[in-house]
Image (cartoon, helix red, strand yellow):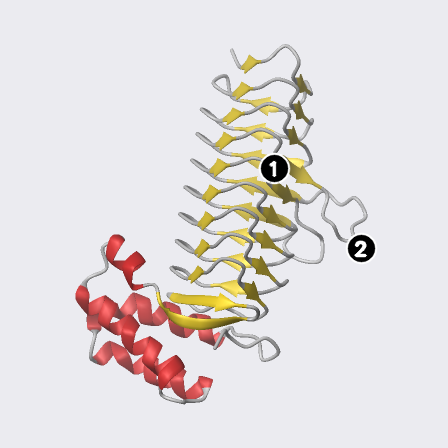
């Protein structure tokens, strides 16, 4: 049987696995689905068309699945989808998507989301990310796998954050942050590449050398973005093992918005 505290209010239409635990004074709406092994702490509100996977740990006072903070929203059945093994700490607020985009706000697997994190409508968060306290994403932001956001990072709408990148505390992002790049400032500027993070994730010396060469092309050789992209694309001849890393960077640069550009 699902373990529900006597004071929890769970709509009979909600779908909770028999191993789910729900704490006191939590409210769960009729369109919520929660997978096996997930625990929901006290004083949480889970509403909207929200699907939560297995083995998540949701701490007290979280608000998941509320309607988007978008004046154009008119009650459409948009969604919030959360994967598996995520830690969602106190006072996190994740909104459902909006009809102006894919209609789904999505969080992947194995993410560590600290207190007061806000995910606005249509944000897409990958896997193995870390969001420190008070990281705030505006609508339509995409965050790649293994990204780390420092405390009080603020991200403008439609910005993309590449895989393995990292922001310093209080970073303010108005432009896309390429994969592997570490940034700092208001507005954020590139400082280095996340070499220590790559070593911890098992990147070989050859792959790390390729990332260093990408940093040189983007930030030290005084090249245009297009010229830097072409130079990066040719790195596979010198570092064949880094082919997936080079392809990821080239794909990211190809999708850069002419209006926003990248963090430079």
Percent x, y of residue 77: 72, 42
Does residue 131 lie above or below 207 as drawn? Answer: above
Disc 1 crowd, CA 10 A, few/some/many (<14, 14-19, 20+)? many
Which residue corresponds to mark 1? Answer: 91
Does residue 171 lie above or below 85 as drawn? Answer: below
Measuring 42% from the left and 56% from the top, which residue is drawn there?
147
Which residue corresponds to mark 2? Answer: 72
Among the 4 quarters of the image, the one containing residue 153 = bottom right
Does dot 1 land on a helix, a strand or a loop? loop
* CA separation in Å, label 1 and label 2: 25 Å
Does residue 17 lie above or below 45 as drawn? Answer: above
Looking at the rendered structure, the number of numbered marks drawn on it comes to: 2
Does dot 2 land on a helix, a strand or a loop? loop
Disc 2 crowd, CA 10 A, few/some/many (<14, 14-19, 20+)? few
Measuring 53% from the left and 14% from the top, which residue is drawn there?
2
Does label 1 or label 2 sit earlier along the sequence? Answer: 2
Percent x, y of residue 221: 36, 88
Measuring 59% from the left and 58% from the top, which residue is drawn there?
154
In the rendered structure, the answer to whether residue 70 lies left or right of residue 91 reads right
- In contact (CB < 8 Å): disc 1 and disc 2: no
Q: Nearer the viewer, residue 142 or 182?
A: 182
Among the 4 quarters of the image, the one containing residue 218 = bottom left
Q: Nearer the viewer, residue 5 or 186?
A: 186
In the rendered structure, the answer to whether residue 50 lies left or right of residue 225 reads right
């Amino acid at each position: 049987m699902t373990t529900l505290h006597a004071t929890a209010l769970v709509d009979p239409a909600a779908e909770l696995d028999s191993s789910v635990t729900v704490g006191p004074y939590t409210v769960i709406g009729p369109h919520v689905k929660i997978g096996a092994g997930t625990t929901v702490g006290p004083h949480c509100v889970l509403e909207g068309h929200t699907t939560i996977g297995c083995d998540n740990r949701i701490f007290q006072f979280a608000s998941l699945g509320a309607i988007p903070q978008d004046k154009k929203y008119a009650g459409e059945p948009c969604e919030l989808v959360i994967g598996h093994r995520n830690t969602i700490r106190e006072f996190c607020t994740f909104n459902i998507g909006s009809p102006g985009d894919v209609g789904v706000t999505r969080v992947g697997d194995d993410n560590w989301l600290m207190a007061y994190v806000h995910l606005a409508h249509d944000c897409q968060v990958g896997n193995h990310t870390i969001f420190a306290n008070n990281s705030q994403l505006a609508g339509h932001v995409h965050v790649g796998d293994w990204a780390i956001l420092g405390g009080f990072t603020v991200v403008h709408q439609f910005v993309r954050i590449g895989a393995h990148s990292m922001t310093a505390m209080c970073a303010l992002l108005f432009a896309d942050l390429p994969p592997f790049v570490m940034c700092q400032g208001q507005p954020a500027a590139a400082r280095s590449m996340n070499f220590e993070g790559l070593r911890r994730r098992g990147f070989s010396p050859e792959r790390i050398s390729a990332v260093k060469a990408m940093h040189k092309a983007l930030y030290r050789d005084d090249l245009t973005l297009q010229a830097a992209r072409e130079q990066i694309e040719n790195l596979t001849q010198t570092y064949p093992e880094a082919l997936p890393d080079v392809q990821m960077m080239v794909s990211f640069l190809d999708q850069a918005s002419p209006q926003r550009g990248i963090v430079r």
